[in-house]
Amino acid sequence: MKRRIFSGARPTGRQHLGNYLGALQNWVSLQDEYDCIYCSVDVHALTTLEDTSSLQTDIYEMMLDWLAAGLDPQKSILFVQSHVPEVMQLYTLLGMVTPLGWLLRMPTFKEKVKIQPYNVNYGLVGYPVLMTADIVIYKAEVVPVGEDQLPHLEMARAIARRFNNLFGDTFPEPQAKLTSFPMVLGLDGKEKMSKQLGNDIEIALSPEETIERVMTAVTDPARQYRNDPGHPEICNIYRLQGYFNPSQLDALAVQCRSAEIGCVDCKTLLAQKINSALEPFRERRAALAAKPQYVKDVLADGANRAQVIARETLTEVKQKMGLI
Ligand code: AMP
Ligand code: TRP
């Protein structure tokens, strides 16, 4: 039997290069080797959303990106978290074996408190417990994510271990699987690329919009003037060239250090490379957008298939915890 993978992403609408390079691409390539389940975690999204009016559109837009990028419903289960409500029951039960101190110490929780001090809700504290429930309800062994999720995976392993110790061996301890691009910086060149921070480049932008966005990127601050020599090793644009333009990477480093090439030229080249790499994706996306019922059908079928597995695990957990 193939080993099982689970991963999820908050329905933030159109995906950005961070999602794409840090996770989505990996998800696509793992489909043949593993039994894969990919989830749009709408309940997790509620921990940061106050206005939920665009949630359905955001789920739909994200699914278009996933399908166009190559997630194949014939190979993988694709579904929306709240459509399999069993996970919320497991979340509650796992909450009983998770020390509060672990959750309050989470760096990701502290970060959110900083970003949204006006909305420190209880769901934010429980976020890693729900994430653990997502993974272990499918007894997934491998979780492909970006680097920012490593503390959550550490917590998932700790909760699974604790449950197993208290109630007998039930869950595998899930292992993270990173891509070769586990952390994509945003256009500010400082923070991780993120929709909430507004420093992102969406993969579904038009070629013209992509060029515009790339042009706003912060590069090497030491290059004030065209003739200033650059430091490619600290430049975010250079890092992205590594992915989209690997054959010219060494030459670009030399040209940047000697100021033979300016940042505008370098950005134009990168935007062109991004556009040609994403052209087939964008064509597939437009074709999918023309049949919105297809996305709904995929998600309905995915939820049915996921629910069969989730119910089985939940019953086992309830038995082990003495509830039935
Ligand atoms: P999110 O949109 O934050 O729910 O993230 C969905 C997936 O994309 C997760 O596996 C993240 O680790 C990954 N991801 C998000 N932002 C980045 C980034 N800037 N660099 C690398 N991976 C990312
Ligand atoms: N916390 C993840 C993120 O922000 C999303 C997520 C929720 C997830 N449940 C998961 C990722 C389970 C992997 C496995 O990206």
Image (spheres, rainbow, N blue to C red):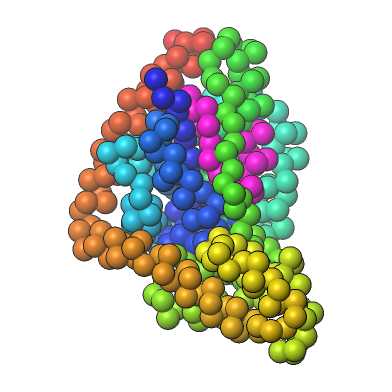
- Where does the image place residue 224, in percent across and percent down from the top left? 76, 86
- Where does the image place residue 46, in percent across and percent down from the top left? 50, 51
- Where does the image place residue 233, in percent across and percent down from the top left? 74, 65
Q: Is residue 6 above or below residue 54?
A: above
Q: In which quarter of the view is residue 75 placed?
A: top left
Q: Is residue 83 above or below residue 92?
A: below
Between 205 and 319, the one nearer to me in the picture: 205
Magenta stretch containing residue 69, yes or no? no
Between 216 and 263, the one nearer to me in the picture: 263
Picture quarter with the C terminus: top left
Q: Is residue 121 above or below residue 289?
A: above
Q: Is there any visible trace of residue 167 in the rendered image?
A: yes
Q: In which quarter of the view is residue 34 placed?
A: top left
Residue 279 appears left or right of 254: left
Magenta stretch containing residue 146, yes or no? yes
At a point 45% along the width and 53% down the height, the residue shown is: 11
Picture quarter with the N terminus: top left
Between 12 and 22, the one nearer to me in the picture: 22
Q: Which residues are magenta?
A: 135-155
Q: Is residue 70 above or below residue 127?
A: below
At a point 53% along the width and 36% down the height, the residue shown is: 143
Between 261 and 190, the one nearer to me in the picture: 261
Q: Is there any visible trace of residue 44 in the rendered image?
A: no
